[in-house]
């Protein structure tokens, strides 16, 4: 059976987010074995494998450098550096669902930044989704009831940095090539994480450590490639929805691999955060469908261009 391009894009997106989730699990397996900057640096190293697949025929290799809108290129590089280092550290210090629930704030933070920085308007339903998302995070964290520590700050920093990355990409506009986006994504871990890894750099001691490090870096790179391929086959809104399957993977790994069962309040909070993100996706998807219907209706009502005979 031949699959349509949108269906292929959705499947690639599912595989991409699954690769990200398994990659996160590999980083957590390296807790206490390697420092988080070294682990994040490996993601940049293995990300170099993507370059031949992203570069198009006739495109200059120089596009990977900060040539097109260099200011936004460096902002994306810095944001990626913070996001990779902070996410690895948070997965090492927190259970995977708890860390991911904070990182799922990224779309809401990006929405708020777009209103503040880009002066975009948001509907009341959008603000409701943001409020529900934050409420879910508060249920997970329960400040005042349970202690908060550095791992929570790292997960929040990863969400904020990823949101800044999204805004910088939107500010740069459609003229930015995929090779340029990849270049900024690789520069952050290679330069930032690489420099911070040097003072405490240690070679992996066991075959298992090497395997976990390779698993993290390679699958993080593979996930990024799959998401890029998915974006060429299906609209961005469809690519984003499977992101929430990461929580299923996180809960599964938390119980089976890391033996970190969740209490009932964490389960409730994680569910609220996930549903709020899906609510926001459905809201945006319905808005896009409404705009398309309106455009088709206007096209039908618009009179055809007069022919020379009609003009007489």
Image: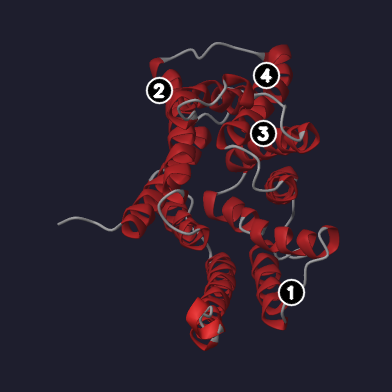
As measured in the structure, the alpha-carbon distance from the residue carrying label 4 to the one carrying label 2 is: 20 Å
As measured in the structure, the alpha-carbon distance from the residue carrying label 1 to the one carrying label 4 is: 39 Å
Residue 307 visible in the shown view = no
Residue 238 appears at what percent x and percent y? 46, 62
Numbered disc in front, either 1 or 4:
1
Which residue is denoted by mark 4 in the rendering? Answer: 194
Whether pointer 4 and pointer 2 mark residues with C-beta atoms closer than 8 Å, the reply is no
Which quadrant holds residue 35? Answer: top right
Categorize mark 2 by other alpha carbons within 10 Å: few (<14), some (14-19), many (20+): few
Identify the residue shown where x is 70% and y is 49%. 152
Whether pointer 4 and pointer 3 mark residues with C-beta atoms closer than 8 Å, the reply is no
Which residue is denoted by mark 1 in the rendering? Answer: 122
**Image quadrant where one finds the C terminus:** bottom right
Identify the residue shown where x is 52% and y is 27%. 47
Residue 302 appears at what percent x and percent y? 55, 84
Check disc 3 and report its element: helix, strand or loop. Answer: helix
Which residue is denoted by mark 3 in the rendering? Answer: 85
Check disc 1 and report its element: helix, strand or loop. Answer: loop
Whether pointer 1 and pointer 2 mark residues with C-beta atoms closer than 8 Å, the reply is no
Whether pointer 3 and pointer 1 mark residues with C-beta atoms closer than 8 Å, the reply is no
Residue 283 appears at what percent x and percent y? 57, 77
């Amino acid at each position: 059976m031949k699959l349509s391009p949108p269906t292929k894009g959705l499947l690639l997106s599912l595989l991409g987010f699954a690769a990200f989730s398994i990659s996160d699990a590999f980083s957590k397996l390296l807790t206490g074995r390697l420092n988080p900057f070294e682990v994040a640096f490996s993601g940049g190293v293995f990300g170099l494998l993507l370059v031949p697949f992203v570069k198009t025929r006739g495109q200059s290799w120089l596009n990977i450098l900060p040539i097109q809108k260099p200011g936004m290129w460096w902002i994306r590089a810095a944001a990626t550096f913070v996001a990779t280092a902070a996410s690895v550290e948070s997965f090492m210090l927190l259970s995977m669902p708890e860390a991911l629930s904070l990182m799922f704030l990224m779309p809401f933070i990006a929405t708020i930044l777009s209103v503040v920085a880009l002066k975009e308007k948001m509907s009341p339903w959008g603000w409701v989704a943001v409020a529900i998302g934050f409420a879910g995070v508060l249920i997970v964290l329960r400040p005042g009831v349970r202690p908060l520590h550095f791992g929570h700050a790292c997960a929040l920093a990863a969400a904020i940095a990823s949101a800044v990355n999204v805004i910088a990409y939107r500010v740069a506009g459609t003229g930015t090539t995929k090779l340029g986006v990849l270049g900024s994504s690789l520069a952050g871990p290679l330069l930032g994480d690489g420099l911070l890894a040097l003072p405490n750099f240690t070679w992996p001691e066991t075959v298992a450590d090497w395997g976990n490090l390779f698993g993290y870096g390679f699958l993080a790179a593979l996930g990024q490639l799959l998401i890029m391929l998915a974006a060429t086959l299906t609209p961005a809104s469809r690519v984003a929805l499977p992101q929430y399957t990461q929580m299923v993977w996180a809960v599964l790994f938390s119980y089976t691999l890391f033996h970190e069962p969740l209490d009932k309040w964490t389960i409730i909070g994680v569910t609220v955060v996930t549903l709020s993100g899906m609510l926001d996706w459905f809201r945006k998807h319905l808005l896009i469908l409404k705009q398309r219907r309106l455009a088709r209706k206007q096209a039908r009502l618009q009179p055809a261009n007069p022919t020379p005979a009609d003009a007489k």
